[in-house]
């Protein structure tokens, strides 16, 4: 039986036990069975998510991130817009990096 079919059958059994619990209550054996089913369902879901995570990591390792060039472009544009190309000091426009650094240093 595949994991999906097993999850489906356990879910049906769990739901029927829940309905029984709400209507007339559960015996100790039924309550224990319900807890075991819930534990098994959680374990199967955990295995399923681990498998999906591993598949996604291997896919990423093979194909890479499709958005890398997009984000690289965004970062370069942001760096260009944040760059100080020149500064007005004492009424004179200076674009020398050393002068810009010396003028900006006291403010930082």
Image: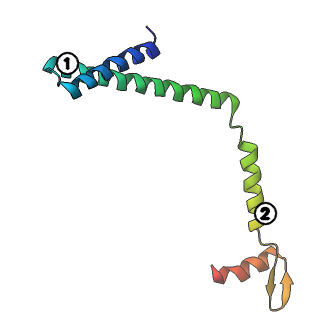
Give the residue drawn at x 30%, y 20%. Answer: 16
What x and y, as percent, mark residue 85?
Answer: 82, 72
Give the residue drawn at x 70%, y 30%. Answer: 63
Earlier sequence position, callout 1 versus callout 2: 1
Q: Quadrant of residue 27?
A: top left
Image height check: is 54 above or below 9?
below
Q: What whole-number distance in Å separates the C-alpha atoms at marks 1 and 2?
A: 67 Å
User: Crowding near pointer 1: few (<14 within 10 Å), some, many (20+)?
Assistant: some
**Residue linked to disc 2:** 80
Q: Which of 94 and 7 is in front in this view?
A: 7
Contact between marks 1 and 2 (CB within 8 A): the answer is no
Q: Nearer the viewer, residue 22 or 90?
A: 22
Q: Quadrant of residue 37?
A: top left
Residue at the extreme bottom of the image, as rendered: 90
Give the residue drawn at x 77%, y 65%. Answer: 81
Quadrant into which the N terminus falls: top left
Q: Nearer the viewer, residue 101 or 49?
A: 49
**Tag 2's secondary structure?**
helix
Quadrant into which the C terminus falls: bottom right
Q: Which mark is residue 30?
A: 1
User: Crowding near pointer 2: few (<14 within 10 Å), some, many (20+)?
Assistant: few
Q: In which quarter of the image is residue 31?
A: top left
What x and y, as percent, mark residue 95?
Answer: 84, 77
Give the residue drawn at x 67%, y 27%. Answer: 62
**Tag 1's secondary structure?**
helix
Q: Which mark is residue 57?
A: none
Residue at the extreme front of the image, as rendered: 23
Q: How is the image coloured?
A: rainbow
Q: Kindly report which numbered mark, 1 or 2, lies closer to the viewer in this rendering.
A: 1
What x and y, as percent, mark residue 60?
Answer: 64, 32
Q: Say whether residue 32 is left or right of residue 9.
A: left
């Amino acid at each position: 039986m595949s994991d999906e079919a097993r999850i489906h059958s356990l879910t049906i059994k769990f739901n029927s036990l829940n309905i029984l619990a709400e209507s007339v209550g559960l015996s100790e054996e039924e309550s224990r069975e319900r807890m075991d089913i819930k534990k098994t369902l959680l374990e199967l879901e955990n295995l399923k998510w681990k498998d999906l995570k591993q598949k996604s990591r291997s896919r990423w390792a093979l194909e890479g991130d499709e958005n890398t060039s997009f984000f690289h472009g965004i970062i370069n544009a942001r760096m260009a817009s944040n760059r100080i190309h020149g500064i007005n000091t004492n009424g004179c426009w200076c674009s020398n990096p050393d002068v810009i650094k010396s003028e900006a240093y006291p403010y930082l």
